[in-house]
Image (tube, rainbow, N blue to C red):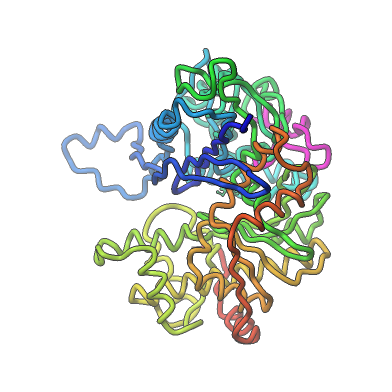
Amino acid sequence: RMMGALVAVDLGASSGRVVAGRVVDSVVQSREIARFSHAPIQFPRYGKHDDAAGARPLSDTGRVPAIHWDLPRLWQKTVLALRTLENTDVASIGVDTWGVDYGFVAEGEVLGAIRSYRDQRTEGVAGEFVRTVGAQELYQVTGLQMQTFNTIFQLLADGKNEARRAELAVAEKILLLPDLLNFLLCGVMAAELTNASTTGLIDPVHRTWNSSVIERMGKAVGQDLGVKLPDLVQAGNCLGYLNQDVAQLGTTASPARIINVASHDTASAVIAAPLIERSAYISCGTWSLVGVELDSPVVTEASRKANFTNELGVDGTVRYLKNIMGMWVFNGCLAQLREYHPDLTVDKLSEAARSAPALRTVIDINHPVFTHPGDMCQRIQELAQLSDQPVPETPAEIARCVVDSLALAHARAVKEAAALANVDISSVTMVGGGIKNTLLCQLTADACGCPVTAGPVEATATGNLLIQARAHGDVGEDLSELRNIVRSSFDLIHFEPESSVEEWRSAERRVFTHHFL
Ligand code: LRH
């Protein structure tokens, strides 16, 4: 019989989509069922004695808001999309989302709110823990980049807050977001490895939970965390069957399966990055994830200092990469500029950037000032001022500054990845929504001084579908075969470097990189 459809639920940090597809004659055929935006939501957070202010207006801007994800929206949109497929023969469903974030489950339900990794409760927490363990030692045993939002630091922050600590105490399991959605879909709990590798709780060599770090953490939060982490499973595992109350998919004889895909969005994107020999990849979305595929982790001091991470990919691969703030900054500027220019769209702003003077002002796009939501344009202007460069004022100038700076950061990370992992790189493969900005692709080729191949845009959903197809035995086992399928399914765009790398090198020297703002 003709195999049923595969459904990818792909939730990025700024938009989600549900895609139905199949692989027919080594070609991915897919159709978007739903697409929706979503964003971290800010709630004001008050001090214990704020009510003493009485009827006076509260104007203390020093308070940091709590930032949650809109799980009800994400779930509802997913369910509605699935229901449009009722009476279709759906073979399976796979879920991927951004990394690191998690929820608690107790008594068969989701407990409390899902915090966003942009929530500032982790501030200061990481430093303290890292100092006690030792930064070098921690890197050696986890291979993970230092980001204040790593799951490990979020859990530590929870342990420091009475209310969250109480939730953590009654939580039966801690589930990363895709695992949580899978649980809602089929009632089975597990932790899929690629995403678990973003927690800081994985041993990247043995590819297991890292019992020594988990024990240490447990002491810090006064809980046995080990029992709260579900068993690890690999991408391709059949977790369970869709609860028919959620949606009636598949046939009565065989309801749709829930398959663990590479549930970290970046891991799915890398699967569908049509890499050739000696090619680095850049997965361009909210973040730009820049790196190379390796078969073992790199945990040298140089690597730690450059803040490269060893996240896990499918089939024993290591995603050796660096997080660069990507379209997050661009989209943040767009949102802000739209207050004065309501007609502005992503496309218009990208086009405007094209016409603005090149390399006039370059900033450190990865500067921590950009981490939290807020006034992106002003932060850019401040960094420009601090480095004595012309301050970008118009939408075009601001956008150009972001795209130039992002391309520069891409090139730098590619170079670092090659040096740190001791590999030769002669081309770059870009995937993800950010490649719709073709100026970014061209400038990345220019800054890297090597050709760029861009595509597919929907790499993450494609990687999600491919792992499902493989689990059903519809495609070959090899990762290289999966990438051949990608190559024959999408039109890839090639960009040759057009300007001299020297211009970029000298621009790089203007970047202000001090992190004390
Ligand atoms: C990209 C991503 C990235 C993580 C970040 C939290 O969406 O998953 O790989 O570091 O979000």
Please state if 330 lies on the left or on the right of 300 as rendered: left
Q: Is residue 38 above or below residue 300?
A: above
Residue at left offset 62%, top offset 75% = 445
**Foreground of the two, 235 or 27:** 27
Q: Residue furthest left?
A: 55
Is residue 231 located in the magenta-colored stretch of the structure? no
In which quarter of the view is residue 377 placed?
bottom left
Foreground residue among 143 and 434: 434
Query: What is the number of callouts on the image?
Result: 0
| Front residue of 88 and 460 | 88
- In the rendered image, the vertical position of residue 384 relative to residue 24, given as above or below: below
Q: Residue at x 51, y 61 (%)?
A: 434
Answer with left or right where residue 159 lies relative to residue 332: right
Which residue lies most toward the top here? 107
Which quarter of the figure is the N terminus placed in? Answer: top right
Q: Where is residue 465, by image quadrant?
A: top right
Residue 127 visible within the image: no
Q: Position of residue 499 (x, y in %)?
A: 60, 85
Bounds of the magenta segment: 197-220
Residue 312: x and y, percent? 73, 44
Q: Is residue 429 visible?
A: yes
Give 404 or 345, whichever is nearer the viewer: 345
